[in-house]
Amino acid sequence: MKNRSIPMRRCAGCGQSKPKEELDRYVIRPMDKCYEYDETGNAAGRGAYLCKNSPECHKKAQKKRRMDFRRTD
């Protein structure tokens, strides 16, 4: 039996790579120009991951401007 690899994602706040289950996903909503919490983890759109239950990571991501809305067109 093959061992399945664990999907790793990087936190936008602290920059640590962690298993996907340990992070919350936020998806950009272009019409509202804001991020929303993605409960299912597979909503359409550009996403960012932050550590669960970590207000420090939320603050760091905002300070580093990693959660800002950027339009490229």
Image (cartoon, grey):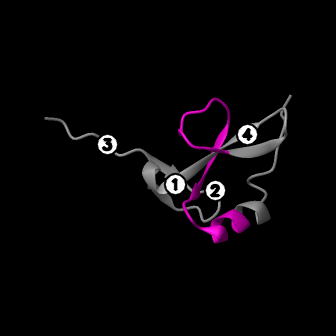
Q: Is residue 26 above or below residue 32?
A: below
CA gap, disc 2 to disc 3?
22 Å
Describe the element under mark 2 as helix, strand or loop: loop
The Cα atoms of the two marked residues, 4 and 1, are separated by 16 Å
Instruction: Identify the element where label 4 is drawn.
Output: strand
Give the mark nearest the N terminus, 3 or 4: 3
- Closer to us: mark 2 or mark 1? 1
Q: Residue 12: which disc?
A: 2
Q: How crowded is mark 2: few (under 14 residues within 10 Å), some or many (20 or more)?
A: many
Residue identified by numbered label 3: 5
Q: How far apart are marks 1 and 3 (CA)?
A: 17 Å
State the image coordinates of residue 39 (x, y, percent, origin top left).
Answer: 57, 43
- Quarter placement of the N terminus: top left
Question: What residue is shown with label 1?
Answer: 23
- Marked residue nearer the N-terminal end (4 or 1): 1
Asked whether residue 52 is drawn in magenta, I would say yes
Q: Give the range drawn in magenta.
A: 37-60
The picture quadrant where one finds residue 46 is: top right
Taking the view exactly as shown, the residue that stands out farthest to the left is 1
Mark 3–mark 4 distance (CA, rounded to whole Å): 27 Å
Decide which of tag 4 and tag 2 comes sooner along the chain. Answer: 2
Give left or right: position of 31 versus 66: right
Quadrant the C terminus occupies: top right
User: For residue 28, which numbered disc appears in the image?
Assistant: 4
Q: Kindly identify the amino acid type of the residue bearing the numbered disc 1.
A: Leu
In the displayed structure, would residue 11 be above or below residue 71?
below
Q: Residue at x 67, y 32 (%)?
A: 45
Q: Which mark is residue 55?
A: none
Give the side of residue 38 with respect to residue 16, left or right.
right
- Looking at this view, name the residue that lies furthest to the bottom: 56
Tag in front: 3 or 4:
4
| Residue 38 falls inside the magenta stretch | yes
